[in-house]
Amino acid sequence: MNIQPGGCYMDGTFGRGGHSGEILSRLGPGGRLIAFDRDADAIAWGRERFAGEKRLSLYQKPFSSMLEVAGAEGVKGRVNGVLLDLGVSSPQLDDASRGFSFQQSGPLDMRMDRSRGPSAAQWLNSAKEEEIARVLWEYGEERFSRRIARAIVRRRQERPLQTTEELAQLVASAVPSREKRKHPATRTFQAIRIQVNRELDELRQGLEQA
């Protein structure tokens, strides 16, 4: 991104502020940066890290709110560039309580914004088998999507899935492990995260507004 010192920019995925910090370092006194993140922890961390930085406005909102916020900030039609760095941040993966990682046990949540929408556990324990299979196939390209969906439904009839460890073990037991370098639950976790956070819908809306 070619940063102009007096320009106005948007960072749609603030995370831990790496990209925002770089943009700010290139902006002059009259520049503006508006950053978004659905994760309350990321916003709180950013407000502490960039305390006193008047060129930066932080919003706990999805980046699909860009037009709305641009209007509120008085910069509609005057934004010089938009940055989107999609995916899960390292702090989110490292925090077991967020439920994004199959490498450690934690609550099966996966929500970027924990105050909104059903968690991964709530969705998995209520969605129809056909819907689970479709999500795993479309969002994770999981070739064993039907087999995994069947195993999930069978398991929840006995007791609901609650933790990342339970889901990872269930997936591993449901499919043959042919990719030795990749955990068998990798695609499943990716697909469920995309579904829970409606990431593709969010991306489509964001690109339309950018």
Image (tube, rainbow, N blue to C red):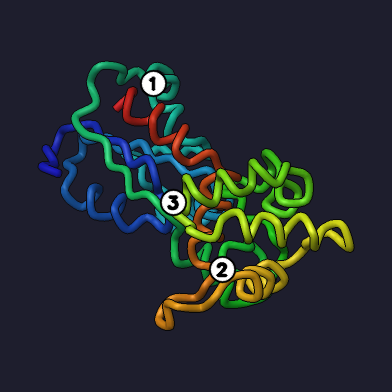
- Which residue occupies the foreground of this view, 74 or 123? 123
Q: Which mark is residue 101?
A: 2
Density class for disc 3 (Cα within 10 Å; few <14, some 14-19, many ≥20) is: few
Of the numbered discs 3 and 1, the one sitting upstream in the chain is 3
Q: Are marks 1 and 2 in contact (CB under 8 Å)?
A: no
Q: Secondary structure at mark 1?
A: helix
Distance (Cα) linking label 3 and label 1: 25 Å
Circle 2: element type: loop
Q: Is residue 96 visible?
A: no
Residue pictured at 69% horizontal, 43% vertical: 115
Residue where numbered disc 1 is placed = 67
Q: Amino acid at mark 1?
A: Leu
- Mark 1 vs 2, N-terminal side: 1
Q: Quadrant of residue 196?
A: top right
Q: Residue at x 67, y 39 (%)?
A: 116
Residue at (51% x, 47% y) in the render: 194
User: In front: 16, or 48?
Assistant: 16
Disc 2 to disc 3, how far (Cα)? 31 Å
Dot 2 crowding, Cα within 10 Å, few <14, some 14–19, many 20+:
many
Mark 2 vs mark 3: give the one in front.
2
The residue carrying mark 3 is 51
Q: Which is closer to the viewer, label 3 or label 1?
A: 1
Q: Is residue 188 above or below residue 139?
A: below
